[in-house]
Every structure is written in structure tokens, then in C-alpha cells.
Amino acid sequence: SVTRALLCVFCVASHRSISRGAMSDVSQGRCQHNYVVTAHKPTAVTHSAIGSFTHATETDLIVAKCTRLEIYRLTPSGLKPMLDVPIYGRIATMALCKPSDNSNGKSRLFLTTERYGFTVLSYDEKTEELTTEAFGDVRDNIGRPAENGQIGIVDEQCRAVGLQLYDGLFKVIPCDSKGVLKEAFNIRLEELQVVDIQFLHGVPRPTIAVLYKDTKEAVHIKTYEIGVKQKEFTSVPWAMNDLEGGSNKIIPVPSPVGGVVVLGEETIVYLNKSEEDTEVRIKAIKIPSRANIMCYGAIDPDGSRYLLGDHDGTLYLLVVVHDTKNVTSLKLERLGETSTASTLSYLDNGVVYVGSAFGNSQLIKLHTEPCIDKDGNPTYVEIIEEFTNLGPIVDFAVVDLERHGQGQVVTCSGVQKDGSLRVVKNGIGIDKRAVIQLPGVKGLFSLRANDASQVDKYLVVTFINETRILGLLDDSDTLDETEIAGFNAQAQTLCCANMQGDVFVQATNESVRLVACDGTLRDEWKTSDGSDILSAKCNPTQILVASSGGKLHCLSAAGGKLKLTASKTFEHEVACLDCTPMNDGTSSPICAIGLWSMEVVLASMSDLKVITTEPTDEDVIPRSTLLCAFEDISYLLVGLGDGQLITYLLDESTGALSERKKLSIGTQPITLQTFKSHTTTSVFAASDRPTVIYSNNKKLIYSNVNLQEVLHVCPFSSDAFPDSLALASEEDLTIGGIDDIQKLHIRTIPLGAQPRRIAHQPETRSFAVVCAQIVGEDQCDVLRLVDDSTFETLNQYQFEENEFVGALKSCAFTDDAATYFAVGTAISLEHEDEPSRGRILIFKVDDNTTLCLIAEKEVRGAVYNLNAFKGKLLAGINSKVELFKWTPREDDGHELINECSHHGHIVALYVATRGDWILVGDLMKSMSLLLYKPEEGAIDETARDFNANWMTAIEMLDDDETYLGAENSLNLFTVARNMSAITDEERSRLEVTGEYHVGELVNKFARGSLVMSLRNGDNLHVPTLLFGTANGVIGVLASLPKDVYEFTEKLQTCMNTHIQGVGGFKHSEWRSFRHELRGKSEPARNFIDGDLIESFLDLKPEKADAIAADMKCDRAEITRRVEDLIRLTH
């Protein structure tokens, strides 16, 4: 029924639309130009494959996440990321194939997209990029798209590719022995309701097995031999009728055994017929408890063992017992629980990748002996690692829980037992473990007790004219002030660290001191001319000192003595320096020096001979230099005095610097410091906008830290403060642990049920969350009250049997100081196509954090949405929009009384309001604009979009002109009122002003931002919306000023001229607005693809320069403007 489809959380409605009418010119409103960018990439895994893709002798895992491909290499230490690339299309099918005459021994990747594009990809080891071997379009001019989705399969010997894209047609693409694709052809397929198709293994000619349903819903299987030369099916080797009705998947068994395994809900059947057999051989086994098997993964190359995953997340082992020729029996064993799997890939040594679109993906280890899980059941499964998946996001709330002026998104994610709330915030959080009020700090340094110690004992805090030492004494977990006898406590410390040989080094303006760990002063060095030391840096064996007059000195500390090994004088004063060893070494062959001449110099540490001189091309003095390595790639980072950061690639062997990139981190001087988080090296850039720099897929990522200001930082890890940092601001010294290093920080609150609606109530510091819980074999909805800081469930309310919640809102009413949660429901009965009854319930949170039902109103239909509106409650109920007022009763209570309503919709699924305006998103009739007239007590329609769009989300972009919609063909579009129209008919139309294919099923828009509130000085302000999708994407839609839009549109056009999409797919075609019944695509307009724009920062310099030349703009200026957009949007 229509209603049950609407109440289903995770479904994609059928694609139905009609062509739009002619469009008239519409005046350009304030939000006509929009920029769409992904803040969180898709995380729902749809496909995975295992094979030798990047190298003939390596094992690779290839993961498809709807519009992205991720490639990992299996190493002894785990999965190593190799590549993460966007695909200009939604991946529909994916398979690895290895041509028989392939000289390099590597597999190729065949995939198709939902828009009927296909490509064959290989991996180029020299460039470390994907190479397109073939691509094209497999669309047919006629045919009904396959009801159960596309099927794409590759013959095991790579002799042919098979595609079932349309009902009644099977497309064959022949391949030669080298994997070159030949001309495709279609073969008529009698079976219209195809459930699954697979190529058989070990057969002389390409042969497929077709699992299908007949007109009476009975399930059968039939095999066809493909005649490539004849371009038709040449024979039917065998067939079997009347399989179990729930059969849904075919597993082809490898040769020499051959045949297929058919997976059903109650039985698993093996079928085969060889030339010697007179009839089909059958072996069957009953599944102990009814299961809907969703995916499988082979363990052994000979097909002896398979992993099966069902819709409840149960993992089974299927054993096909055979004697290398005949199957003798089937065995099935329950292994344990995982996330609900959408794909299973056996890696090696009992390790399995569980890809999920319904919960977190996982790496699991299978054991030979069982243990007991948390529910007391025996399990052979151990979860090694989890990969966060936000999908499907069915609802979310944008809140500022920490009152920092930065939005956080709390999503309803996951399905059934994998359901959870996810708290998503931009940047990296600091868990404050100790805070000391200590103004005026000028530097921080940590010291271990001796060389053998693995933890820090002392924290050296320096000020303008003194140095204090805080220590963890006598195994205490409290930092107390202490002394180290050999230190100069009456001077500012410029550098302080442990040196090899159980000694400390302290550099001040006066001297460099070498102090034994017991406090004894071992040695002291001063400049020969008595000049002041201006800056110093050291590593475990070397000390680099700069003194006034542009002098630079290198010291060693061997044998407890300081020895001058080299000196050099520069023409300009030294502003900053660094000699950090690469890759955890104890010494560095080179050092990096920043000069007052706005130059950076690389010099040899042995003799301080200049290797490279690089001008910064800026009018600001370098304030910090840092040599570092990420993912085995060496970099030089330079922090400037105005908050800008310059990065270079560094060739350690020659000292050459290349690929200069510049970005603005803050407005104050930057101090750079390396630190480790979970054995991974990162860099902390201290400034007025503190930032952590790390690398992912060989790309530098910049993630802001959720602190207002950090001036100085150093690692400080002890037993009392493990994996911590010491951070100094103008007023405070903080010791805190750092969250996982990632662009977005995600906190998971497992619910054990599927969350479907969420609302936040700041007044009571709580969330209300509607969850669908499974009780026995039935599902019931429950309203949970959740604390907004601890996320503890405080109270809950269970709804009636067959009552499903469609709407949840926090609201307040006129002449009532209290705040309430309003819930809208539908009573869904089997004999009704559409609910005839529903309820609106009003809850209040009392002082004991209990949900109290204050009032309820029975309505005639399902309540799909609720909005607080003008001190009243606006509800979308079946085909009407109804307004209720909160009316006092004689018993001091209140009740909801109908004030007015508006009819004329098919189903009023979504409602957005602003002022007196009401925007309605209909199930099938796109959007309409209503106006509430309080003096008349009426709601009238003002304008509507006459196109047929099946809406999934709506929002108002400005007060009364521009409106945004998302529909189930995965498009975004904007409509606007024609304010200058002359006739009433023209004024009654909402004209389409922008169109864009986002490629994601958008479930909700909400106003808000993930970035910190803008500081003074930012000259660009863009209003933003956030949206959540079924694949776990959190997107940002920003309305741009016209000049910024024109710049980004030109950049987008130039980039498309110079950059080819992976697999030959074109960006312009991918983003084109397509409706199934329009007959053709319409180019995207008035929307900018922010993901493409941001990829400019990752281009090689020669490619970026070519684009800049076309733009007639400096590359640095383009980079600056793109970085500004990133900072403003996400």
C-alpha cells in the first residue's frame, strides 16, 4: 500500500515523473545560485571484490560506496589505503576479471552505473592511478528497466560480460583472450521476472544460469549456453522447476565440481548436471531458522566453503562437501553476529571484510573454537575493526550542544539492530583532563625521566623571564611544581628535550645547557662573541642554534659534552629553524631555516652548507618551519606570521622543493609541532584557529581543533595522561586527550533499535527520538527521551499496536510558557490502503525527566509532518494541511482545536514554513506554496510547480522567493515565484530556476552549518543548509553571491575541459538533471559541484596552471578562493 511504502524508512520510491512545461523568465532571487558540496562522503558499502588489482603478487580489497571507489592492499599490519576516487555515476554492478593472456598478471575491474554507463579499469603502478581500458554506454532505446535492478556478471575465463538491464533482454559483450571488449549484442530472454543470473564455471562455452519467477510467482532455474558467433542462446544444458519460493541468489561453484548453489529463505540447494548425467543432481539442506540471505563470499578457490550473511546480521558458514567431482552433502553452521552485511569478502587467514549499507562495516576474525558473546550465545566471530557508516540517515537535528557557536549534527542512522544516533561535528575534539590558569606562557616542552622511560615525567613551562617545571612525582597523577637543579630557571627556555645518553638539553637566550637526568650540569655552551641566542631546536643527537647577526650553529651532545660541529652566517637574521628527523630517526641530515628575508633555506646538518633556497613569495616573515613525513612522503611545512601555511614536497636525497601550496589557517602566527596519535604522526598548527594536519590517501588534510585558541603545544603522554597534549592559550594551560584524527568527528550512541525521527529541546536539554523496536516478530514504535549531553535514555513511551510515528517536533504555543514535544502517528491496518486514523500527541518533560502525555488529538489520516507555526501546530495529514491552535480547557489543561486547513494534495509528505508562508512537498505533485491569512483564519494556495516530482525533502531558501526540493530521481531543483508576472496565471506558477543531479536520495534538509561562527574580517557570508542521505552523506548547500557563482561556474567549466572523469564518465552528464519520462537529460544550471571545485587543490601543478591560464587568473588566487569556500561551508 502507499502508506506502508511511505512509512518504510529505507526504501527508494519508484521513479515516475512527467516532462515539465515551458519555463518563463524569473527574476533572480537572493538564493538562485547554489553550491553543493559533500562534508561527509558516502559510507554505505554496496559492493566489494577481492583480487590482485594493483600488483600481480598482492591481494587487494576494492570497495564501492555508491559514487566512490576505495582500494586497499592487504598487508601483515592490516588494510593499507591505496586509492580513493570519485565515480561520476552510481555504481550498479562491479566485478573483477583476469584475462587469460594478461601479461602483467593483474585483474581488471568492470563496473556499470545506474545510468547505463560501463567501464573497465586497471591500475597503473607508475602513476598510482586508475587507467581506463574501455568505456561506453550500454543503454537500449527501448525496454523496461529490470524490476530487480541491474545485474552485471563476468565469465570466470573472461570470455564474455553479461548484463541484464531490461526485462526480457540479456546483453552480451564478448571479450578476447587479452580482455579486449568486442561489439555487444542483445539476446531475447523469455524469463521476464529475473531474480538472479550467474555464469557457470568449468564449461567449454559461456553459459548462464537464470533464476526467475513465472506469472504465478513460482521460482525456477534454467541454464543457457551463449553462442557468441550466432549471437543467441544455442542450447539449454539443464533446468529445474519449482524451487523454494524465497530463493533469491545463485552461487556458481568453481570447477572441477561446477554447478550452482541456490540460496532460499528456508532451504539451500545444490544443482548440477554433467554430460554423463541423465537428470539434474540435487543436494539440499534446511536452514534452521528462516533467513533472508542478502550476500555471500567465497572462502576457498575450489568452492568448498562460503560465508552467508542474512538480513538480521547473522553470519553462516556453508560447506559444500565434495570429492573434487561430485557434491556429496551440504553443511550449514551459524558463526555469530555481525553488522547486517551487504557484501562479504574473505581476505586471508580467517579475516573477513563485512561491508554494510545498514550499519558499520567491519573487519572480523573467524576462530576455530567458539567463545561466548555479549548475549550469552556461542560465537566464532571476533570484531577486529569497525568502519563508520552513517547510512541510512533518515532524520537529523542540527544543534550547538557545547554552546561554541558551532553546529553539530545528530543523525538517526542504521537499520534495525544496527540503529544508532551519530553525533557529527567538524574538527577534532580535545578531552580536557586538566586545566590550570596560567597566563603568559611562551613555550611548552615535555621530558622523560631517562632514555629507558616510555612516558613523560616533566612539563617545562617557560615565560618571558623565567622557566617553571611541573612534574609527576612519586607515581602521582597530579602535576606539582618541581626543580631540575642544572636548569636555568631565571630565563626563557627556547628549546628543551631529552638527548641520547640520559641527559636533558635546555637552550635559553644566554646559553645551551646539558643536564644529567639527576640534575647535574654536565656542560654549557655559549656563543663565542657573546651574542644572544634567538632560537633553538634539537633532536636526540643534534642541537641547532641561531644567534643574533644571522649566525647559525650546529652542536652535538655525545659523551655528555657539547661540541660545536658547524657554524654559518647568513646575510639576514634567522626567524625560525627545525631539524626534526624524518620517520622516527635520531638525527637529521638536513635542517630548515626561515629567514627575515622571507626565504626558506635547506642546509646540511654536517657543515650547514646551503642546499636549497626558496623564497616564500610573501611579505610576511616565516615564524615556524617543520620537516615531517606522512605516509612515507617527506614535506616541509612553513608557518607564517599572518596565519598562512605553505607546504612543499621535499626530496630528501637532493633537497629539492616542489608542489608549493598555500592556505590560510588563521590570522595569527603559526607554531608547528609534531605529535603521535595511535602510532600515526600528525602535526599540530597552533594559532588563533588551531588545526591538525594529517595525511589520508597521500593527501594532506586539515582539520580544525574545537578550541578557540592555542598559542603553544607539545606532546605530553604519561600514565596519568596517556596520549595527551599540553596546550597553552593566553590565560590557561590545558592537558587533554585528542580525538581520533579525522575531518569530521563522529560519536556513536548505539540504540539496538532503528531511530526514525529526532527532535531537540534546548529548554529541557534533551532529545526525543522515535525508534522502531522489534518485539518478537512484531515491530512497535517507542518514543525515547535522551539526555543531550550524556545521551542516556531517561524515559520512554510505547505507542499502540499498529501505530507508527511519522512526525516529531519540539514546539511552543501562544500564551503558554512551556515547551512540548509533538508526535504525529498513523494507525496502519492491513485491510486499509491508506490509514483512516492517526493521532497527534503532546508530551511535556517534567522536573523528573519523565515524558508526560498532556493532550492527544485523533485525526482522520496519517500525520506525516508537524511544524511549530505562529504559536500553533501545523500538520500534514494525508492529502491536507491542517492548522491546530492550543486552546485552554476548563480543567486548566489544553487541547488541540482545528482552526483551518487546505486540501488538494495527493499526500502532503513534507512541510516547511517561514513567516506566513507554507511550502508543501507532495508525494507526486512536486511543491506548492500556501499563504496563511490569520485575519481570515484560512490557508490559500498562492503558487505551485506543475511538474510531476516525487518529493523526498523540501526547504525554503529565502523569505518568499526561492524554494529547494529533492526528488526520488536523485535530483535537486529550485523553483521561484515570478514576482514580476503580469497575469494571475503566471503568478500562480513556481518556475524552475535551477536543476542538478546530486546522485543521492536526500531524506532531509535543515538549516545550519558545521563550521564555527564567522569571525570579524571574513568578507564573504553564505547561508547554508545541511542535508542527509540514504548512503550516509552529509552534504552542504550554500547560496552564493552572483560574482562568486560566476567565478566557480567558470572554474568548473575549465576543470571539465582539462580533467577526465575516472572510467571515461563525464562530469557534465553525471550532474545533468534527468527524469525518466523526459526523454533526455537537461544540463545542470544554477548549481555548482563543490566536490569538483575543491578537487582543484589536489591537482598536479602543471594541470592547475593550465586551468588557471584558461581562467586568466593566478593559481594562488584560485587556491585562496577555493579554500575560502571550504572554510565557509565545511
Image (cartoon, rainbow, N blue to C red):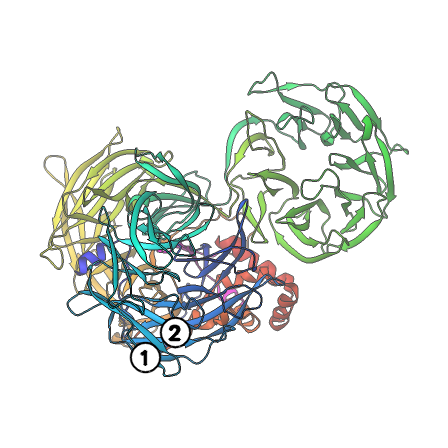
Say above or below: 456 vs 634: above
For the image shown, how many numbered marks are present on the structure? 2
User: What residue is drawn where x is 57% and y is 18%?
Assistant: 476
Give the residue furthest to the bottom: 230
- Mark 1 and mark 2: Cα distance apart in space: 10 Å
Residue 839 lies in the magenta stretch:
no
Report which quarter residue 256 is drawn in: bottom left
Where residue 444 sits in the image (x, y, percent)?
Answer: 66, 31
Q: Which mark is residue 205?
A: 2
Specify the amino acid type for callout 1: Thr
Task: Say which of 967 and 855 sits in front.
Answer: 967
Say above or below: 558 vs 183: above
* First in sequence: mark 1 vs mark 2: 2
The reply, left or right, for residue 473 in relation to residue 296 is: right
User: What residue is drawn where x is 56% and y is 60%?
Assistant: 56
Specify the amino acid type for callout 2: Arg
Task: Say which of 498 and 998 sits in front.
Answer: 498
The reply, left or right, for residue 605 in relation to residue 178 is: right
User: What residue is drawn where x is 59% and y is 54%?
Assistant: 698
Q: Which mark is residue 123?
A: none
Q: Contact, CB < 8 Å: mark 1 with mark 2?
A: yes
| Local crowd size for mark 1, using a 10 Å CA cut-off: few (<14), some (14–19), many (≥20) | few
Report which quarter residue 365 is drawn in: top left
* Magenta extent: 1022-1048
Can residue 470 be seen here?
A: yes
Residue for badge 1: 234
